Image (cartoon, rainbow, N blue to C red):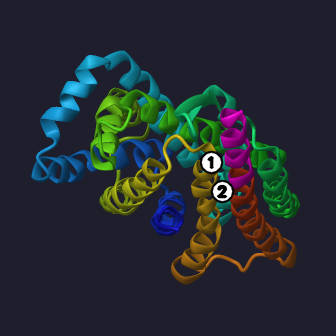
């Protein structure tokens, strides 16, 4: 239950990403600065936390052991995740991006065969290649239905270009985030805590953000004071609070792909949190009935997905124990 609660808290803070990115776009801010400033501002926050916990040396030792892997999977997990999300903010409202983002639940399930999970048997723990949780995946299709309902309604009022630029980048991000996160968990093998891992991935992704910043400087000029402040808030709320909470939740279920899928499913709550925030602070038009139905379907799909994942996990564990005993 604790990983699920942490996941929901992470979803609340992640919602600030969609709300503030939408606010920055409405005020004329460039997506380039929205993306790069978040991770640049995250560094001092996380450095202070890790230094106060006395874990900085262990982190650098881990990074220098496998620098190529850190650079690659941080680029995937952070760069290909957040850059496309900020780009999409220029073409879709925040609540719609948050809703479409829930496709990551399906992406995460389809990535399962790329990893091994630890299974407890009578003979002791063994590692087996993960299998696609088809029962949970079927429930994830309910979430997909809700996303389709929201996107179909939105497409009636905007051009095809806006729909594609609001959807395709989010699809890329939905694969990159769980892939980068899981790969880094495999690389760290429990040797680093959530704070260290987030700081390490942030530092390893800095080359991308510096290059992007230089490009933004020549194409869009310096960011406004308002965008700089809002990017700092995103860095604190979403980049630090939400990411650490989410990584902590995934660390608690590391090696258990079924429970990991359930934690990732909690991120569906971002849709509701984002919509409430945009209605309160950005005075956006109230979504249509069809969009509301889509959001409700997404949340119901999330609940069913978590329920089925737990049942499937128990049945799978029983089968593995039986097989090992025979």
Residue 83, above or below 24? above
Q: Secondary structure at mark 1?
A: helix
Bin the neighbour count of mark 2 within 10 Å (Cα to Cα): few under 14, some 14-19, many 20 and up: many
Residue pointed to by mark 2: 97
- Asked if one can make out residue 188 in the rendered structure from this viewpoint, the answer is yes
**Residue at point 63% right, 56% down?**
262
Q: Position of residue 189 (x, y in %)?
A: 38, 33
| Residue closer to the observer: 265 or 323 | 323
- Asked if one can make out residue 111 in the rendered structure from this viewpoint, the answer is no
Residue pointed to by mark 1: 88
Residue 260, above or below 74? below
Bin the neighbour count of mark 1 within 10 Å (Cα to Cα): few under 14, some 14-19, many 20 and up: many
| Range of residues picked out in magenta | 314-326
Residue 189, above or below 259? above
**Real-space Cα separation, disc 2 to disc 1, in angstroms:** 7 Å
User: Do the residues under discs 2 and 1 have CB atoms within 8 angstroms?
Assistant: yes
| Residue closer to the observer: 285 or 140 | 140
Name the image quarter holding residue 33.
Answer: top left
**Residue at point 40% right, 27% down?**
187
Name the image quarter holding residue 177.
Answer: top right
Camera-near label (2 vs 1) is: 2
Q: Main secondary structure of the magenta part?
A: helix
| Residue closer to the observer: 275 or 125 | 125
Q: In the rendered view, does 240 fall on the left or right side of 256?
A: left
């Amino acid at each position: 239950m604790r990983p699920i609660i942490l996941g929901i808290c992470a979803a609340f803070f992640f919602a600030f990403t969609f709300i503030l990115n939408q606010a920055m776009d409405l005020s004329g801010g460039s997506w380039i600065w929205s993306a790069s400033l978040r991770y640049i501002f995250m560094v001092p926050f996380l450095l202070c936390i890790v230094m106060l916990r006395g874990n900085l040396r262990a982190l650098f030792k881990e990074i220098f052991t496998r620098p190529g892997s850190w650079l690659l999977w941080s680029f995937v997990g952070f760069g290909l995740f957040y850059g496309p999300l900020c780009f999409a903010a220029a073409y879709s409202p925040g609540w719609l991006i948050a809703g479409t983002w829930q496709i990551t639940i399906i992406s995460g399930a389809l990535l399962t065969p790329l990893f091994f999970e630890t299974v407890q048997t009578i003979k002791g723990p063994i590692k087996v290649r993960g299998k696609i949780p088809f029962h949970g995946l079927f429930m994830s299709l309910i979430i997909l239905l809700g996303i389709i309902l929201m996107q179909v309604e939105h497409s009636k009022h905007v051009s095809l270009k806006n729909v594609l630029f609001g959807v395709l980048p989010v699809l890329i991000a939905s694969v990159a985030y769980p892939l980068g996160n899981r790969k880094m968990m495999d690389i760290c093998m429990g040797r680093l805590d959530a704070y260290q891992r987030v700081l390490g991935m942030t530092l390893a992704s800095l080359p991308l953000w510096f290059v992007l910043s230089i490009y933004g400087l020549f194409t869009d000029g310096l960011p406004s004071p308002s965008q700089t402040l809002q990017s700092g808030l995103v860095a604190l709320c979403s980049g630090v609070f939400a990411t650490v909470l989410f990584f902590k939740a995934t660390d608690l279920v590391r090696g258990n792909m079924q429970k990991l899928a359930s934690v990732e499913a909690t991120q569906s709550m971002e849709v509701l949190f984002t919509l409430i925030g945009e209605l309160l602070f950005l005075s956006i038009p109230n979504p249509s009935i069809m969009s509301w139905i889509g959001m409700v379907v997404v949340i119901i799909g999330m609940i069913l997905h978590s329920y089925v994942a737990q049942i499937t996990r128990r049945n799978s564990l029983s089968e593995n124990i039986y097989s090992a005993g025979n």
